[in-house]
Image: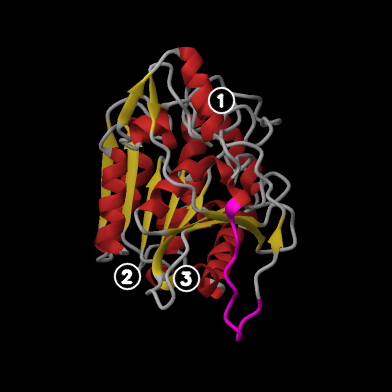
Amino acid sequence: MMCPPGSIEKGLGVRKVLVCGAAFAATCLAALAVPMGAEATVPDPSPTESAPTVVPSEETGTGAPSGSPETGGTTPSPSAPSADGAGTTDGIVSGSAVMVTPRLPKFKTYAYGKASRQRIDAYWRQSAPGAAPRPAVLVIHGGYWLGGDKSSWKYLARRLTAEGYVVLAANYRLAPKAVWPAQRNDAMSALDFMKKHAKVWNLDPNRVAVIGSSSGGMLATQLGTYGTGGQRVRGVIALSPPNNPFLAYQNGGEPGAVPAKRMLRKAVVDLVRCVPGATAKASCWKRLDDANSTNHVSAGDAPMLLMHASGDFVPVTQSTGLASALRAAGVPATVKVVQGEMHASGLLEDEHTYPQIVNWLNAHVK
């Protein structure tokens, strides 16, 4: 799930260092898209714990399906999302400038469960012997709960490892095959996995934040609120999260709703596997209530940074209610609105977004 080509690099505030023509840009792009698995080796785990299962890399690219929630483009059929990660590349070079790509970190894909979607990518830099464990970030992709892939946040993972973080990006089982709360269960399992095997990557299991985009942002806020979220993670950053699926369902049925809102409405039905309404069974409403992060808020939840664009098809009202509930419970919550029509990772087009993310992480985790 990524924003249109070139937008993440602009949003990350990477300094443009070389102006070149289109032909040279294409050459640079090919050089930047080097597979990361080539240099990745896993340090030996602690003798007292079993090593995590390593699986062959499943990377199929770094972009979102065309028209996914993070692209803002033409919306694909709700019943048939495009193939995960197809059609874009990482380390994107614009037609007028080459962006600096961070030094490649070590990289491995692991299985945190038996299902094919229960896979997690680890990005880390080798620590010196005896070095203190590093803070960590779990990244959860978006895609209407119907699609998307962990590889879509590869470039951000590289940047964050350069900032001193260990980064793990997880896939999860998708609707409609997997009904809610399978997605939250998988996010929790991925988090437990990275903490259990923390020594493999020299990460500090007590200093973990989660970043999610779009539907992955909703899963991130669930991790921060379900039970006592503050005991699970130190903080949550969510970009364009539909924290209240029933509200998204209602918005998608309004006259004149844009295609992305209508698709999100259909995705909510697929997520809870029922149609909200007067004839809906009690079990349907129970799943919808459970999928609303605000309903899980309590004292001791994780601090949050919630971000939307002013023209986002997932409106800021999806986060203001959650933020109000968190503050009422004594939990710090900040809502930021970025001017523009962007969504999810598209918010990184704004030059202030990435520095805000890093500063917030440093203040709450590092």
Q: Looking at the magenta stretch, what is its main secondary structure?
A: loop
Q: Residues within 10 Å of mark 1 (few under 14, many from 20)?
A: many
Figure quadrant of residue 89: top right
Q: Which residue is mark 2?
A: 299
Q: Secondary structure at mark 2?
A: loop
- Can residue 68 be seen here? The reply is no
In magenta, the rendered stretch is: 39-50
Q: In terms of sequence position, does the residue under pointer 1 or pointer 2 come before the other?
A: 1
Name the foreground residue: 344 vs 317: 344
Q: Nearer the viewer, mark 1 or mark 3?
A: 3
Name the foreground residue: 198 vs 233: 198
Q: Please, is residue 187 above or below residue 342 in the view? A: below
Figure quadrant of residue 30: top right
Q: Residue at x 43, y 37 (%)?
A: 345
Residue 191, horizontal then vertical, whole percent = 53, 65
Q: Amino acid at mark 3?
A: Asn
The circle on residue 67 is 1
| Cα–Cα gap, marks 1 and 3 | 37 Å
Q: Residue at x 34, y 33 (%)?
A: 11
